[in-house]
Structure formats: structure tokens, C-alpha cells
Image (spheres, coloured by chain):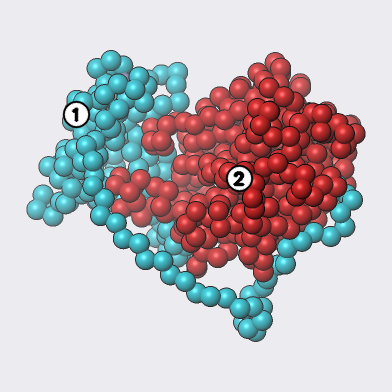
Chain colours: A red, B cyan
Amino acid sequence: MRKVAVIGAGMTKFVRRALETPKELAWEAAKMALESCELTMKDIDAVCFGTAPDAFDGVHMNGEYVSDGAGAWRKPFMRAFVGGGTGVFSSIQGWYHVASGMFDVVLVVAEEKMSSFYPHAQAAFLTIFDNFTERPLKPNLLWIFALEMNRYMTTYGLKKEDIARVAVQHKRNAADHPCAMLGEPNITVEDVLNSEVLAWPVQRLDVSPISDGAVAIVMAAEHVAKRLTDKPVWIEGVGWNLDTAYWTNRDLVYPRYVEYAARMAYEMAGIKEPRKEIHIAEPYDPFDYKVLHHLEGLQLADRGKAIELYLDGTAARDGNLPVCPSGGLLGVGNPIAAAGLMKIAELFWQLRGEAGARQVPGNPRRGVAQAWGDLMQIGTVVVMGR
Amino acid sequence: MTSRFKSFPGTSLSEEDFAQGEVLFVHDALKAEYARDTGVGIGAYLAGLRRGVILGSYCSHCRKTVVPPRVVCEWCFRPMSEYVPLRDTGVVNTFSLCYVTWDVQRISQPEIPAVIVLDGASTLSETSVVMGGILHKLSEVDPKAVRIGMRVRAVWKPPEERQGAITDILYFKPIEE
Ligand SMILES: [Zn+2]
């Protein structure tokens, strides 16, 4: 397998409702990613594209529909879709396009426009549930998160006011992100605990927002990357894994699929002690408790103990293991596929020392990004280093 | 590069932009209807519910009983051809008190979705697997009194009203002990 680097990245603002169409958002992010490494579409050998369920757009085969905005015209083009895991997976897809030797330079674009679904994007999720055993109960996407959060916090005796610190820290981090939708430098734990109860234990500010946005990166083989930049950020390991399709047969207390994906990525990266060898983590954070869940699956905390990273400052931007220095989905926003690729872009900027006000101190050398999705069952993990 | 870029694309719209007619939009409604065959495994499950019985499926190779029943064992990829009746009692594995409906309407009395682990399915220690877990709702209970670990029993529709659907079980309620 060939070495693969990320050499450029771009993103749109993440907003509640964008004027731009999905194609237009995809193009804006792609254009910025190309400009960032001074390439044009002539230099791109293939395009990988990620977007979540067609139901948001109401366009069947949405990948093909959006393809011109993503720069796919007359190029090898492929859309990947693994639910919320799509954004991180799209970079894995870009990686194997290049690592295999098939292509030297690949553009990876992830886009999501959730606001079109009327009146609320939440209802688009109804069709992810089993149509015989679950959908007649009129389930709501919040159910599965609330059920998982309750199982997780009750098993380990965690307090809501502690878990709320995750949301607070991410939204504060996002105040330094120029594309963020919910950056709030002064938000407090009380604000989270006083927000509307949607599906106990899940409250309004425990949840990331419905958003529109797009992110793009450029990936290149070693010989090209070294010619184009003196600061390539290498993809050191990738992993993905799917758990049972029967989500009620899974003990929601622990994301085993994330563990398997992480072990695959760490083995490829030669990482034996992730807690020492990983300097920045961008775990998937659509809900505050999910960060804790994922940190445990990523082997960055013992089971039931991830909250301690927040309580003792380890997870802070200037802590020993900064978690979501970008502000994450809770702070920057959650245009699903784009949000996952945003985490890859964040590691790219952080490891190059180009993250501006968000920069993690101490010249971090290695980071891990992770996303999760489908019916709460897939883990997608990427380790990046310089 | 973010530190080098000074402005980012993407134009945020507000409610006001719509109220003032500054943004054009097109309303669209998709209509898609389906008549789905329930298949072999779930077909047997739903037929069982119509008779007032919850069926699981058994793998004679792994000696595991799971619910909902299925034709293939996820563990060994061999057929799960035997259906076995479970009990209509179980334990609340987790629950939520939900104040919004699937289409985000607010409700004052919460719905109580729960994962219920049915008695009679396999249990395994040392794994993250709950073979008897199904999704349903709780009722006839004070929401404040619901606890993980609570024992519950199915409340069925009268036999003549059952249709062979998961809703033939109206809900689960606590077992008085
Ligand atoms: Zn088996």
C-alpha cells in the first residue's frame, strides 16, 4: 500500500439554513480545498463524495445529482454512505483510492443540507427503523439516543451535570471557529441543565443542531504530496466496523464497533498505547454523552471513566489530550456527512499548526478522528500524523 | 489553512428572510406507498403475536435464542430454523421519557420507549449482547417510578382485534411483586 497524505482542506460555514443548494455548498468547499493546495480540477484523478440519507433532499441517488458541484464531471466518482459515519468514511474511501495505486490525487467532498426537509429534518429519520417491528410504534430518532444515554449513565452512576460539561466545553471551543453555528464562549452547565427536556435524559443543549454545510479535502500519494507541500499530514491508520443490525440486541452501554474500528486503525498506525501516542482526539459528538462513549471505544479512557478527562481538564484545548478542539458537532454544527469530514480537516489544520485561535499547544504530532452512524452501529476511525 | 482564510462561503438565512419574501422556495411533497411482505422470520414473529405468543429463533449450533426471530444466525451464519416461544415478561434494560413525537410535536405526558429484555431468550455474560432485547413502550406506570431493572409484562390487545403486528402488544406494564 502506498502512503497517502492530506494536502488541502476547505469548508463552508455551518448554518441552520443555507441559501446555497447542496451542489453549491459542495462546490464552495471543493473550490476552497483546491485553492488551499494550489491545485485545479485538472490535477484531480478521481472524486469521492459523501452525503447522508437521500430522504433529507428528497432526491433519489443524490450523489449523482450533486456530482457536478463536487467536481465529478468526466471523472471516476463514487459516493459512500454509512449514515453518520459517512464523513470520516469518505476520507477512508479517498485513502484506499490512492493507497491502492489506482489514483495519485483524489478530491473528497462531504455535503449535507438538512434544512430542506419540512417541517423538521427529524422526521426523515423515521425510515431508518425496522418497518415491521419498530416503525409501527412511531419511534423518534431521539429515542435511541435517550435509551443509550440512560443505559450508559445509569450503569456507571454518571451525573447529568457532569455530562453537561462536555456540551459546555465543545460550545466554548467552537467560539473560536470561524465556521461555527453554536459557538458560545459564556455558556454554563446550568444553561444545559435548564434547557428543554426532549427525551429524558436528553435535553436541548445535549444535542447538536440540524445544519447545512460542506467540507472537502485533497488527498495525494507520497510522491505527489512531497512535491506539493512541505507539510503533508499522513493517514497513518484507518478502521471501520459494523455491529449487529438488531440494535436492541446490543448492550448500549459500550460501543464495541468503535473499539474494533479503533483497534484496526491503531494496528495499522503501529499504535500500542493510544493514551500516550494520540495527542488530539476528534470523536463524534452529536450528543454530549456520545463523546464519552466514543472515547471509551477508542481506548482513550476506561469504561465509565471518560468523564474524568473533562472533570480534570485533560480534554481541554490546553490539556494532555484535547478533545474536539474544533468545537465538534455540538458547537460547530452537524451537517451529518460534512461534520465527520470536518473532523479530518480539523486534524489536518491542527497537525500543521494552522488552526488559528483553536490551535492546540505543544506541536501535536498525531490525532484520531472518529464518526459513528447507521442504526447506531458503525464506527469509522482515522489516525493522522505528521 | 483556516488561519490563512479570512472569509468562508455559505450564506445563513433567517426566518425574516422568508417572512419578507426575499428567498424563493418551492414546496414539494413526495408520496410513496409500500405493501411489504413480512418474510419468513418476521412473518413467523408477527403470526405469533396474533396468537398472543412472542417467538424467538434458536440456533442449534450456537445454542442461542434471539428475538426478533431471523432466518440466519449472525454468529455462525447458519440457518436459524427453529422458532421457540418466549415469555411475555421481561426486564427494562433502558428507557426514556420522551416529550416530543416523531415529527417533533410537543406532548405534555411523556411517551416511555424502552428496550425490554424478554424472559426466555439467551443471556451471555462478558459480551455486549442482549439477545432478548426488543423495542416497545411502557404504560400504566408513573413516569417518575420507571427504573432500569424493573420487571414488566406485556399488555395485549383483545384476541379479536389483533392483526399480526408489533402493536398487538399495546405496551408493557410493571409486574406487581
Ligand atoms: Zn449460530
Q: In which quarter of the image is residue B128?
A: top left
The residue pinned by badge 2 equals A77
Q: Which residue lies furthest to the front in this view?
A: A74
Which x, y percent locates residue A327? 73, 47
Categorize mark 2 by other alpha carbons within 10 Å: few (<14), some (14-19), many (20+).
many
The foreground one among A307 and A99 is A99
Whether label 1 touches label 2, CB < 8 Å: no
Residue at (86%, 54%) from the top-left corner? B5
Ligand 1 is found in which quarter of the picture?
top left
What's the CA distance linking mark 1 and mark 2? Answer: 45 Å
Q: In which quarter of the image is residue A108?
A: top right
Residue at (12%, 42%) from the top-left corner? B51
Q: In this view, does A70 lie to the left or right of A227?
A: left
SS category of the residue bearing label 1: strand
Q: In this view, does B108 lie above or below A109?
A: below
- Looking at the rendered structure, the kind of residue marked 2 is Phe
Q: Mark 2 lies on which chain?
A: A
The foreground one among A75 and A22 is A75
Quarter of the image with the N terminus of chain A in it: top right
Q: Mark 1 lies on which chain?
A: B
- Viewer can see residue B129: yes
Q: Is residue A58 left or right of residue A69?
A: left
The foreground one among A304 and A91 is A91
- Looking at the rendered structure, the kind of residue marked 1 is Tyr
Mark 1 vs mark 2: give the one in front.
2
Q: In this view, does A130 lie above or below A220?
A: below
The residue pinned by badge 1 equals B83
